[in-house]
């Protein structure tokens, strides 16, 4: 029952950017798999939602599809973004507004204010 309570919290929209809940999910998977989480393979990946969520949960994700458009979407969703994770923007204007004066990421940088 406690697992279902956790899943109820995990699937909310707010949880998508909540690193604490995502971290707890990754930890539960790690415990359940004795520290050896299995890779995920979705051979009919379509839009890539399953491999994307698997990747967010810390699993090694593999995807394929008959449709080359779906393959391209999957490349854009799960293969390319991790290569650029934690890198600052290349645009100097966006790079400037990235951090607050305290050194934290500015969630409302000047470049995005309307
Ligand atoms: C229902 S969609 C998958 C949706 C996906 N789970 C998602 O969340 O977006 C099914 C996919 O299977 C692919 N497909 C159908 N037959 C296939 C086959 N024999 N080999 C590989 N992919 C196939 C289709 O191109 C389609 O993208």
Image (cartoon, rainbow, N blue to C red):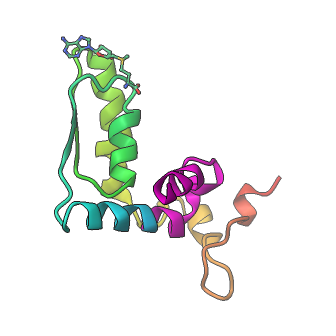
- Which residue appears at 53% of the width and 59% of the height? 91
Which residue reaches farthest front?
1
Location of residue 56 with respect to 20 vertically, above or below = above
Residue 76 in the image, given as x and y percentages of width and height: 36, 37
Which residue reaches farthest top?
67
- Which residue appears at 65% of the width and 54% of the height? 14
Residue 57 in the image, given as x and y percentages of width and height: 37, 55
Quarter location, residue 64:
top left
Residue 38 or 68: which is nearer the viewer?
38
Quarter location, residue 109:
bottom right
Q: Tell me where the magenta segment starts and ends, as one range.
A: 1-23
Residue 45 in the image, given as x and y percentages of width and height: 30, 26
Task: Point out the quarter of the image occupied by ligand 1.
Answer: top left
In-image side of 22 versus 110 (left or right):
left
Location of residue 60 with respect to 74 vertically, above or below = below
In-image side of 13 versus 61 (left or right):
right
Which residue reaches farthest bottom?
102
Location of residue 110 with respect to 46 vertically, above or below = below
Residue 80 or 15: which is nearer the viewer?
15
79 inside magenta stretch: no
């Amino acid at each position: 029952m406690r697992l279902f309570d956790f899943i109820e919290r995990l699937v909310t929209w707010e949880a998508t950017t909540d690193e604490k809940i995502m971290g707890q999910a990754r930890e539960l998977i790690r415990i359940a798999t004795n520290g050896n989480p299995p890779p995920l393979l979705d051979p009919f990946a379509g839009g890539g939602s399953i491999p994307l969520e698997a990747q967010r949960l810390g699993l090694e994700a593999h995807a394929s599809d008959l449709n080359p458009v779906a393959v391209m979407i999957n490349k854009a969703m799960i293969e390319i973004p991790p290569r650029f994770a934690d890198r600052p923007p290349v645009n100097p204007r966006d790079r400037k507004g990235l951090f607050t004066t305290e050194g934290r990421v500015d969630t409302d940088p000047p470049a995005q204010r309307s």
